[in-house]
Amino acid sequence: MEKHKIGDSIIEIVQGDITKQSDIEAIVNAANAHLRIGGGVAGAIHRAAGPELELESIKHAPIEPGEAVITGGHDLNNKYVIHCLGPVYNKDKPHEKLLADCYINALKICDERNINSIAFPAISTGIFGYPIEEATEIALKQIIECKEILNFPKIIRLVLFSDNDHEVYIKTIKKLL
Ligand code: AR6
C-alpha cells in the first residue's frame, strides 16, 4: 500500500475491491441517478450490502451529477456508504467540475459527521467513460485541496480495481505532491 501524509491525514493508494475494505468507516459508491443497484462497482457494493441498501438509498433519489448522499452500510463491514453520481464523460458538462464536486461533497459529509476514514473507487471511469488519466488528476487534486480546509476524514483510501488504474494513481500523486 502506498501512503502519503498531508498534514495530520493520510492518503492511501491500493489495488483491490472496495467491498473488502473492512477497516474503513465509509465507502463510496459510483452510483446512478436513481440510486438503484446498477452494474460495475455499484453492483458489487449492493451485492455485498444486501437488498436493504437499495431500499434505503432510493429514498434519496434522484440525485444530480456531482451530488453525494449517505446511507448505512447494512451487511457491509463499513458503517456507511456515500453514493456519488459522477458525470457521464462528454455528456454531463462541465465534466471536470462535476467530477471534482463528487469528491468535495463526499469529503464534506465526512467532515460534518466526524467520519474518520473513507474509501473511493475511480468515479466515472468505468461505464461513464471518463479517461483514467484525466479523472485521476481531478480526484487527487481535489482531495489534496479539501484536506487543507476539512478536519475529517483523516484517512482517505483510493481503491483501484485494475493494475493500470493503480499505476496511474501512483504516478499522478508523485507528480502532484
Ligand atoms: N472495487 C473497486 N473498484 C471497482 C470495483 C470494485 N469492486 N468494480 C469496478 N470498479 P463503474 P462509473 C471500478 O462503471 O463509471 C453503474 O452501473 C471500475 O474498474 O462502476 O461511475 C452505476 O449504476 C472503474 O474503474 O462506475 C452507474 O449507472 C470504477 O470502478 C454507472 O455504472 C468505476 O466504474 C456509473 O459509472
Image: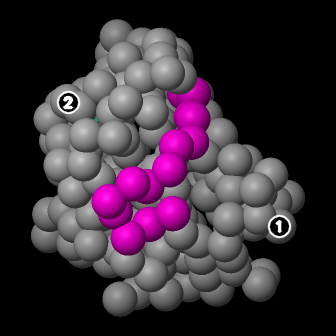
Circle 2: residue type: Gly
Question: Magenta residues?
Answer: 66-79
Q: Which residue is mark 2?
A: 38
Q: SS for tag 1?
A: loop
- In the rendered view of the protein, which quadrant contains the N terminus? bottom left
Name the foreground residue: 78 vs 166. 78
Rendering coords of residue 33 (x, y %): 39, 18
Q: Pointer 1: residues within 10 angstroms few (<14), some, or many (20+)?
A: some
- Residue sitting at 23 percent across and 32 percent down? 37
Query: Is 130 rendered above or below residue 139?
Result: above
Q: Pointer 2: residues within 10 angstroms few (<14), some, or many (20+)?
A: some
Name the foreground residue: 65 vs 82. 82
Taking 108 as reference, is 75 left or right? left
- Residue sitting at 27 percent across and 72 percent down? 20
What count of labels does the image hold?
2
Identify the disc placed on residue 151. 1
- Residue sitting at 34 percent across and 10 percent down? 91
**Residue 56 sits in quarter:** top left
Rendering coords of residue 76 (x, y %): 34, 63
Q: Nearer the viewer, mark 2 or mark 1?
A: 2
Q: Magenta: predominant secondary structure element?
A: loop
Rendering coords of residue 93 (x, y %): 48, 13
Disc 2/disc 1 C-alpha distance (Å): 33 Å
Q: Is residue 78 magenta?
A: yes
Q: Is residue 173 magenta?
A: no
In this view of the protein, can residue 37 be seen by the observer?
yes
**Residue 103 sits in quarter:** top right
Colour option used = one colour
Rendering coords of residue 49 (x, y %): 29, 53
Q: SS for tag 2?
A: loop
Query: Is 161 rendered above or below residue 85?
Result: below
